[in-house]
Amino acid sequence: MSMYTATIPQLTKVVGSFERWLDKAEAHAAEKKFDANGLLLARLAPDQFPLAKQIQAACDAAKFAGARLTGKTAPAHPDTETTIPELRARIQSVVAFLGTITAEDFEGAADRTVTLSFAPGMGMSGADYLNEMALPNFYFHATTAYAILRHNGVPLGKMDFLTAIAMRPI
Amino acid sequence: MSMYTATIPQLTKVVGSFERWLDKAEAHAAEKKFDANGLLLARLAPDQFPLAKQIQAACDAAKFAGARLTGKTAPAHPDTETTIPELRARIQSVVAFLGTITAEDFEGAADRTVTLSFAPGMGMSGADYLNEMALPNFYFHATTAYAILRHNGVPLGKMDFLTAIAMRPI
């Protein structure tokens, strides 16, 4: 299986779908007549990251997966977003960055040594990083963002999470 | 990258970790003096699956990933669990099933046609199924289960989700 395929097209698609979730959040807020940006402070537990940080973390998980597996430099995002338009710009920046990464950039990615800032002196193989860290961590923050929106009444459904899938007639 | 490695060791590890989450749920309930089984009915939105169903769905996503990519028959689980001990038995059954699947069983898995009951007449390649459906759907239900527990005060942290990762000195 191609590590490129396991990473770039799928993360691009799901990160891009965050904008559809925000569309539904804004429509819900308009219907209920509240400020949609207030949802960015919502959280499911008092010591859990709120929605804005969940989306920031999912965006970071996606961009760092692309960067660490290919040696490319990810764009910097200092976590300053406090409004939905600002989060949309971040989402679009990550989608654009992922779009610069090609299948050829993944040459040798499975055996590349990936380092993580929280574990100095340690590393993971690229394949282990993808399977054990990058994908689980990405989906963790994406699903938590989705769950916060669902908990606050935004009418999302499972297909908003899975998005379009590559089915074909058999 | 090996589809076996992307699937069986990682899903086995995370499904197995659900028991650690339930350990913490039981300890939290004992401390607060409530019936831990009551958590299985908790949900984050009135039209969302409760905790028991989230764990059942994550277990199913894991077992079907193993089954559909290899042609093996997954054990049947009729979603009758209403207690934590019953859910533990289901978790253990899925871990045991995944343990019967070898790297050799994944021969040709990327090009295998996978069919899904909700889309008759349609199919996905094994690689597309893994990337676009099996892993996202698994992590979706696992994270939602985790979020329900966090929302109900169970002291889980991110490493309970990621579990041990294959880091090595560099």
Image: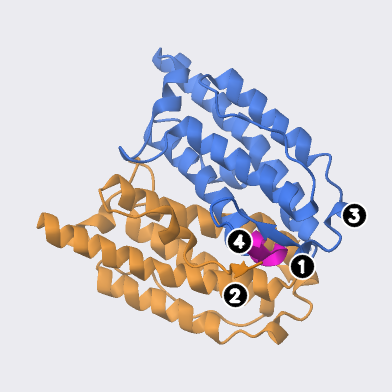
Chain colours: A orange, B blue
Horizontal and vertical percent for residue A141?
47, 55
Q: Nearer the viewer, mark 1 or mark 4?
A: 4
Label placed on residue B111: 1
Residue at x-position 27% and y-position 58%:
A40
For residue B52, above or below residue B125: above
Q: CA distance from mark 3 to mark 2?
A: 27 Å
Q: Report which residue position mark 2 lands on.
A: A8
Q: CA distance from mark 2 to mark 1?
A: 19 Å
Tell me, yes or no, whether dots 2 and 1 are on the same chain. no
For residue B158, above or below residue B51: below
Disc 3: host chain: B
Q: Report which residue position mark 4 lands on.
A: B121
Q: Nearer the viewer, mark 3 or mark 4?
A: 4
| Secondary structure found at label 2 | helix
Q: Nearer the viewer, mark 2 or mark 1?
A: 1
In this view, the residue in front, B19 or B136, is B136
Label placed on residue A169: none
Q: Nearer the viewer, mark 1 or mark 3?
A: 1
| Secondary structure found at label 1 | helix
Q: Report which residue position mark 3 lands on.
A: B104
Q: Amino acid at mark 4?
A: Gly
Q: Amino acid at mark 1?
A: Asp
Image position of B170 (left or right of B145): right
Q: Nearer the viewer, mark 3 or mark 2?
A: 3
Which image quarter holds the N terminus of chain A?
A: bottom right
Disc 4: host chain: B
